[in-house]
Image (cartoon, rainbow, N blue to C red):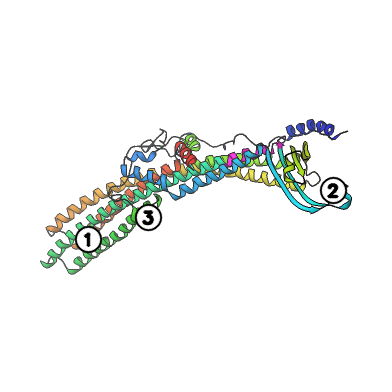
């Protein structure tokens, strides 16, 4: 039997084996059996089932924040790194796709030497030049899915890198909004702290007047003065927090601290949306969260790599050919020198030693199982983070409502105490207690306003965001 007949008879058997083996990859990833309807922590007066808008930060209606977000999306260093990782994954995909194309090579050589006397034709000089030129062409027949599985794995890597980049954008937007909110909340807390200090200064002046008139002792003056100093000491710490938030804004927007535009820290009221937050439901959450999509794509990529490993069980068949010319003079290479060519298939089959192949398959299957477990965990974590954020936000609003009532009660009590104090009906201890209660209630309410802002942003961060258009443009730019 000639080699040609042997090859032609082997091809159907190899094709049948390919059909039996097939690329071992999945087309979609099953979502874990979890409840994905309305959120358990979605209280009607706090959130609404309306879908979360893509540019959720615009719900705050703050042009300064909108400008900071635009700057962060354009210049943040973490985003630039994620775009570079997309470019790297796409380059790997192009490399995998190139395996589908014929591979062409050119070669040329030249030299001077002496041939053996027995190999030299009569009448020819044994010494002389030898020159050759040729071209090779090879094309792998992807009967067993090695190339197609490799391309599928690379596509999954690209999709995962894109989803990771979306996740970075969600993080950067949330962090930028949080830093801006922290700066605004710190400014509001500074305003409250200064008002407390001003009230205590008035109370101290009144207590000193009463002391000078003999209606109270020096201990009362010392106690009011001590409380005043304690509250005044909180101002530098709050100012440090405000400046730290502004410095964070500079970094997030790709700037040095000194380059932050003027007026960024002028807002002195907390950043807050007073209407119920649009949050959608669990199904929309899983479709929107970038980390869920990235984990899903890694499952698909790793399952495709099982097909790459399994294809090594079968021969690698390459169709190829070569053509060339050899002569003793360079000019003869193109003017009648002897021309040679070769056409035919090449079969490369690591048949005897199968253990390395089994090891690679086992490793690929282990990676695929790990990716699937990571996907399930990511889904569960996404639902947990959303429920936790919604619950914490609702409780933060509830606590603030109670603190508002506490401040109103403390202000009412303080007004009564001050009036009675002016008439000499109360001792200094009762006055001090009322002033301390009011100062603590106001400071705690200001802190809670800041906490509400942070919890609100945490909800948006847990819900993810819609980033299709931004990622597409950034990907193409990268």
Q: Nearer the viewer, residue 402 or 362?
A: 362
Does residue 304 appear in this view?
yes
The local crowd at label 3, few if under 14, some if 14 to 19, many if 20 or more residues have their Cα within 10 Å, is few
Numbered disc 3: secondary structure: loop
Write down the residue under mark 1.
432
* Viewport quadrant of the N terminus: top right
Rendering coords of residue 314 (x, y %): 76, 39
Write down the residue under mark 3.
256
Q: Is residue 83 above or below residue 419?
A: above
Which one is earlier in the sequence, the residue at label 3 or at label 1? 3
Q: Is residue 152 magenta?
A: yes
Report the magenta residues as a range: 139-157
Q: Is residue 443 above or below residue 394?
A: below
Residue 124: mark in rendering: 2
Residue extending farthest to the bottom is 218
Q: Is residue 13 left or right of residue 390?
A: right
Does residue 289 appear in this view?
no
Numbered disc 2: secondary structure: loop
Q: Is residue 113 left or right of residue 426?
A: right
Q: Nearer the viewer, residue 432 or 326?
A: 326
- How many numbered circles are shown? 3
| For discs 2 and 1, the disc positioned in front in the rendered view | 2
Measure the C-alpha gap from mark 3 to mark 1.
46 Å
The local crowd at label 1, few if under 14, some if 14 to 19, many if 20 or more residues have their Cα within 10 Å, is many
Would you identify the image quadrant in which residue 330 lies? top right
User: In the image, what residue occupies the spot 73% across and 32% down?
Assistant: 19
Measure the C-alpha gap from mark 2 to mark 1.
122 Å
| For discs 2 and 3, the disc positioned in front in the rendered view | 2
């Amino acid at each position: 039997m000639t080699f040609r007949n042997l090859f032609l008879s082997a091809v159907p058997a190899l094709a049948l084996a390919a059909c039996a083996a097939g690329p071992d990859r999945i087309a979609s990833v099953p979502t874990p059996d979890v409840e994905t309807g309305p959120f358990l922590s979605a209280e009607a007066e706090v959130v609404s089932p309306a879908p979360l808008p893509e540019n959720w930060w615009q719900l705050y209606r703050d042009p300064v924040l909108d400008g900071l977000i635009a700057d962060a999306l354009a210049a943040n260093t973490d985003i630039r790194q994620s775009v570079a990782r997309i470019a790297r994954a796409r380059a790997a995909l192009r490399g995998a796709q190139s395996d589908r194309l014929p591979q062409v090579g050119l070669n040329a050589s030249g030299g001077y030497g002496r041939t053996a006397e027995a190999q030299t034709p009569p009448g020819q000089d044994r010494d002389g030049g030898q020159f050759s030129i040729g071209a090779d062409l090879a094309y792998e027949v992807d009967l067993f899915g090695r190339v197609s599985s490799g391309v599928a794995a690379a596509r999954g890597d690209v999709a995962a890198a894109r989803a990771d980049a979306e996740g970075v954008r969600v993080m950067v937007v949330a962090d930028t909004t949080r830093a801006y909110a922290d700066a605004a909340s710190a400014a509001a807390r500074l305003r409250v702290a200064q008002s407390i200090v001003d009230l205590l200064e008035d109370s101290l002046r009144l207590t000193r007047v009463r002391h000078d008139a003999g209606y109270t002792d020096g201990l009362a003056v010392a106690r009011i003065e001590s409380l005043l100093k304690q509250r005044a000491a909180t101002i530098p710490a709050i100012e440090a927090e405000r400046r730290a938030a502004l410095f964070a804004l500079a970094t997030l927007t790709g700037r040095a601290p000194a380059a932050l535009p003027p007026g960024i820290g002028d807002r002195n009221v907390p950043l807050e949306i007073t209407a119920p937050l649009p949050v959608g439901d669990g199904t929309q959450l899983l479709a929107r969260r970038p980390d869920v999509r990235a984990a899903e794509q890694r499952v698909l990529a790793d399952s495709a790599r099982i097909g790459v490993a399994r294809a090594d069980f079968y021969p690698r068949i390459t169709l190829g050919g070569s053509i060339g010319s050899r002569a003793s003079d360079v000019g003869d290479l193109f003017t009648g020198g002897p021309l040679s060519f070769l056409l035919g298939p090449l079969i490369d089959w690591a048949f005897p030693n199968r253990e390395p192949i089994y090891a690679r398959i086992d490793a690929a299957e282990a990676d695929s199982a790990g990716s699937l477990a990571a996907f399930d965990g990511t889904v569960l974590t996404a639902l947990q983070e959303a429920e936790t954020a919604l619950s914490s936000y609702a409780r933060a609003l509830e606590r603030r409502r109670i603190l508002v009532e506490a401040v109103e009660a403390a202000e009412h009590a303080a007004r009564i105490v001050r009036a009675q104090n002016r008439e000499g009906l109360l001792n200094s201890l009762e006055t001090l207690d009322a002033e301390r209660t009011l100062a603590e209630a106001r400071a705690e309410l200001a802190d809670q306003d800041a906490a509400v802002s942070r919890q609100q942003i945490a909800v948006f961060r847990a819900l993810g965001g819609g980033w299709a258009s931004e990622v597409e443009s950034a990907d193409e730019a990268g």
